[in-house]
Image: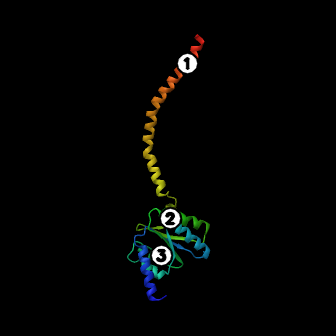
Amino acid sequence: MKKEEKEKQVAWLQDQFKGVKAVFLMDFKGLTVSEMNTLRSEVRVRGGSLKVMKNTLVRLAYKGTDVECLGPDVFGPRAAVWTHSDDSVPILAKTLVDFAKTHPNLGLVKGELQGQVFESSDLEALAKLPSREELLGRVLGTMLAPISAFVGTLAAVPRSFLTVLKAIEEKKAESAPAEG
């Protein structure tokens, strides 16, 4: 690779890693090309990017970015998955953890989330988090529960009154033919 190409790739990587929400480092030694392509397409569908990169170029690209803290872990066969969307972070973590369970040759090394480095065990905990939409639904349901209960209580008073009136009507209807 010529020096100009290397400089272009470093500049492209630096551009990719600026404003990144999360980066996950993986050891892909032992994965076949078709397995890597499958993982790459799963990551792309979920809003992320996966790239196998030359380690020296990656260490240069990390300098001055939020993911500079991952520099010491870039050695050997490494690939990186990253996203610029907060919504994609738990989905990508779940995708990587699930793929690693079915493909034992994929090693989850480390990750970075908003400036904090985390280990592979933390990645599994991140994967178990519900999506943003599910969390918002839970919060909304919790906020609406007291209102729903209050409306149910208010509606119960007229409903009970109508039930009593209906019972009185039925009782009068039963006693009226017996008298006649």
Task: Report the disc number at residue 125.
Answer: none
Quote the CA–CA distance across marks 2 and 1.
68 Å
- Residue 66 percent location from the top left of the image: 40, 71
Height in image: 55 above or below 103? below
Amino acid residing under circle 3: Asp
Height in image: 147 above or below 73? above
Q: Where is residue 8, by image quadrant?
A: bottom left
Of tags 2 and 1, the one toward the viewer is 1
Q: Residues within 10 Å of mark 1 (few under 14, many from 20)?
A: few
Mark 3 = which residue?
Answer: 73
Height in image: 87 above or below 3? above
Quote the CA–CA distance across marks 3 and 1.
83 Å
Q: Residues within 10 Å of mark 2 (few under 14, many from 20)?
A: many
Mark 1 = which residue?
Answer: 171
| Picture residue at 44% right of the left edge, 87% below the top | 4
- Residue 117 percent location from the top left of the image: 44, 68
Amino acid residing under circle 1: Lys
Residue located farthest toward the front when viewing the structure as drawn: 180
- Residue 97 percent location from the top left of the image: 55, 65
Q: Are marks 3 and 1 in contact (CB under 8 Å)?
A: no
| Picture residue at 43% right of the left edge, 81% below the top | 10
Amino acid residing under circle 2: Leu
| Picture residue at 45% right of the left edge, 33% below the top | 155
Task: Describe residue 7's horizontal placement relative to residue 109 as left or right.
Answer: left
Return the residue nearer the eye: 107 or 35: 35
Return the residue nearer the eye: 39 or 77: 39
- Residue 13 percent location from the top left of the image: 44, 77
Q: How many marks?
A: 3
Identify the mark nearer the N-term, 2 or 1: 2
Residue located farthest toward the top when viewing the structure as drawn: 180
Identify the mark nearer the N-term, 3 or 2: 3
Mark 2 = which residue?
Answer: 123
